[in-house]
Image (cartoon, rainbow, N blue to C red):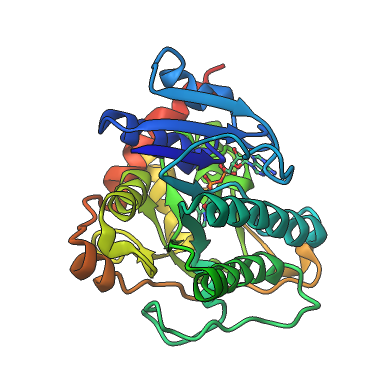
Amino acid sequence: MKILITGVAGFIGSNLAKHLLKRGHSVVGIDNLNYGFLRNIEFAKNDSKFKFILGDIANPHILTDIPADIIVHLASQKIPRYTNALRTLDENYLMLRNVVEKCRFDKTKILFASTSDVYGKNPNIPFNENSDLVMGPTTVKRWAYALSKMYGEQYIIANKDEYGLKYTIARFFGSYGPHQNLTWWGGPQSVFIEKAFKNEAIEVHGDGTQTRTFTYVDDTVGALVSCIENEKSDNEIFNTGSKSGGEIAIKDLAVMIWRLVNGEGSQPKINFIPYTTFGNYEDVMRRVPDISKLKTVLNFEPQWELEEGLKLTIEWQKQFMTK
Ligand SMILES: NC(=O)c1ccc[n+]([C@@H]2O[C@H](COP(=O)([O-])OP(=O)(O)OC[C@H]3O[C@@H](n4cnc5c(N)ncnc54)[C@H](O)[C@@H]3O)[C@@H](O)[C@H]2O)c1
């Protein structure tokens, strides 16, 4: 297949490109390198089945002449923890509109990257794909991200109803692994690893009892490959998660990472940062996916446990710590 990936130089995009090329597909990837890195796609630079285009998906002309059997739309702004919500709302909409218009025009399927954050404050775990999506007040800007993804999902499904657009929506739960962004943009695990390497206190937001589930990137990407190759994914939404649920409190994640980096016997240094530091902020206290749909419809079984995945991630991240 010919696969177009938006956000190819980012974390998930570059890992996905690697898997797809290995499976014999052709990949065209676009990225404006705002949050991605050429080093992430270095492995493909001499591969005749790979083409990289430097460009902004918010520009409607960038996609015009690229033939594809499917577009995997990963490029995105994320939770505006330190930046502004306007950019998240504007850019995520503009990019999606351009991708959907191209898909409609070319009759190409879209595979859209959504997020566990759309389940928001729903207290009923585990979340399945029909669970309620519960947002906080609009005065709290962190919800701008989840809202932009919910809007994206609705926009895609409305386009299916009106114009027959073919889609799959994948809701990712905390993906981590090689090529992850080394700042908070990439999630807590990468900054925790860096602090542990430097023997500096890991900063945990709130009291650290909030839980997340983390998915090793090979499992996230494996689920995406199933969505691309298996027609049973057409016009469906899937949670993508890890092997055994993998729910862990953030303070326990900090301890696990500290010990994987510095040895079992070492005493973790942790600083608890109050949420008030981020202004009007709300956190999600528990986040656990039900991934039975992914298993039964697409026959996909995640393979990785958190500790094994973290060991490989730490090994990869080590190269940036010694420079
Ligand atoms: N990583 C996770 O755990 C996670 C969890 C839930 C959802 N997601 C979603 O998965 C997708 C990929 O996430 P990621 O972690 O790989 O993010 P990432 O930031 O590493 O990758 C996204 C890429 O998109 C590029 N990009 C952003 N805006 C662009 C634009 N206007 N034009 C061209 N390129 C642009 C960035 O430069 C970056 O390389 C995103 O849609 C994200 O919302 C990720």
Name of the residue lying farthest toward the top: 46
x, y (%) of residue 203? 61, 52
For the residue pair 124 and 268, the one nearer the viewer reads as 124
Asked where in the image residue 283 lies, by quadrant, the reply is bottom right
x, y (%) of residue 24? 27, 30
For the residue pair 37 and 93, the one nearer the viewer reads as 93
Q: How many marks?
A: 0
Answer yes or no: is residue 268 visible: no
- Left or right: residue 69 compared with residue 90: left
Against 217, residue 166 (above or below) is: below
Against 269, residue 20 (above or below) is: above
Answer yes or no: is residue 214 visible: yes
For the residue pair 305 and 58, the one nearer the viewer reads as 58
x, y (%) of residue 95? 67, 51
Q: Residue at 37% across / 45% down in the picture? A: 217
- Left or right: residue 240 compared with residue 292: right
- Left or right: residue 197 compared with residue 63: left
Q: Residue at 77% across / 79% down in the picture? A: 138
x, y (%) of residue 129? 39, 77
- Tell me the quadrant of the picture where the N terminus can be found: top left
- Left or right: residue 299 compared with residue 281: left
Q: Residue at 47% across / 48% down in the picture? A: 72
For the residue pair 45 and 309, the one nearer the viewer reads as 45
- Tell me the quadrant of the picture where the C terminus can be found: top right
